[in-house]
Image (cartoon, helix red, strand yellow):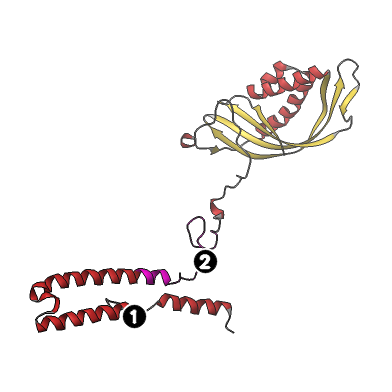
């Protein structure tokens, strides 16, 4: 027996061919009857008495054409009802082809991808629209800048431990001052104090340094160790953390506005 695929192909070819086209009066009993009426009427007209003579010839021809057209339309209608539909799959709900329709492959190039590198911090105010975003200019840092970053690491940790808001305002941006103030207020509500001591820088790498709108930015990866504990405000007893040095890796971003001092503007876990 032929394979299912070959069977479907042969059946489709036969259905596409369809029945042969018939004449104007069609075939079968209806066609024979109309041909007989036409031949008989013409023969009688030649003898002088068919269809009322020549006077009725024009009316007969008009009636004959109308009857023939009606019969032809009726037979065409019945033939279309009897012809089977072409082979193929059922239409899909979306209106497209059914059988053999393959889903569209996803364009991987249009899928969104996460940007690499470090995120540029948002320093105050709303984000700048994309169409008016200023161009970034990369800058070079000298040894004095690197020494300042290392110094800021110890100064900020010590100011936070002392809950010295004035020192924090001098060393950090207003956004960071607000963040530190909220954390210190939360510690006060819980009756604890966060003490950070023994800060020792192990490794520091500059990730990015750029200039934007007259301000300089630098993101550094800092790996350091320190003793970071929580103590009860009333008794001084250990309330959290470890009294042994622990190692931490963080990304610190500094900003220098219009040639001023470097200030801490963001902290991220590495």
Q: Position of residue 49 (x, y in %)?
A: 11, 79
Above or below: residue 29 compared with residue 266: below
Q: Which residue is mark 2?
A: 89
Check disc 2 and report its element: helix, strand or loop. Answer: loop
- Return the disc, 2 or 1, that comes first in the chain's sequence: 1
- The span picked out in magenta is 77-103
Q: Is residue 36 visible?
A: yes
Q: Main secondary structure of the magenta part?
A: loop
- Quadrant placement of the N terminus: bottom right
Q: Which residue is mark 1?
A: 28
Where is residue 55? Give x, y as percent. Answer: 8, 73
Residue displayed at 34% across by 72% down:
75
Left of 177 or right of it: where is 237? right
Q: Is residue 235 magenta?
A: no
- Tell me, for residue 14, which label it has, or none: none
Determine crowd level at label 1: few under 14, some 14-19, many 20+ residues with C-alpha closer than 10 A: few
């Amino acid at each position: 027996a032929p394979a299912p695929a070959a069977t479907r192909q042969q059946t489709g070819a036969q259905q596409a061919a369809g029945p042969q086209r018939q004449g104007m009066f069609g075939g079968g009993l209806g066609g024979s009857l109309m041909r007989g009426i036409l031949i008989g009427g013409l023969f009688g007209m030649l003898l002088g008495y068919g269809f009322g003579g020549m006077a009725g010839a024009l009316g007969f021809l008009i009636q004959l054409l109308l009857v023939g057209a009606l019969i032809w339309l009726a037979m065409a209608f019945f033939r279309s009802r009897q012809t089977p539909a072409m082979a193929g799959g059922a239409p899909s709900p979306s209106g497209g082809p059914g059988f053999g329709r393959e889903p569209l492959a996803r364009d991987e190039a249009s899928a969104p991808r996460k940007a690499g590198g470090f995120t540029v911090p948002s320093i105050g105010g709303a984000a700048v629209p994309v169409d008016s975003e200023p161009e970034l200019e990369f800058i070079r840092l000298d040894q004095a800048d690197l020494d300042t970053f290392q110094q800021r690491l110890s100064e900020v940790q010590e100011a936070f431990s002392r809950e010295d808001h004035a020192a924090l305002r001098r060393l950090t941006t207003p956004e960071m001052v607000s963040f530190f103030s909220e954390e210190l207020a939360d510690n006060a509500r819980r009756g604890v104090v966060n003490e950070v001591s023994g800060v020792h820088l192990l490794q520091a790498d500059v990730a990015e340094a750029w200039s934007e709108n007259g301000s300089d930015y630098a993101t550094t990866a800092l790996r350091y160790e320190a003793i970071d504990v929580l103590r009860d405000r009333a008794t001084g007893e250990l309330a959290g953390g470890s009294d042994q040095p622990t190692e931490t890796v963080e990304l610190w971003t500094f900003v220098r506005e219009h040639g001023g001092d470097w200030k801490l503007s963001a902290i991220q876990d590495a």
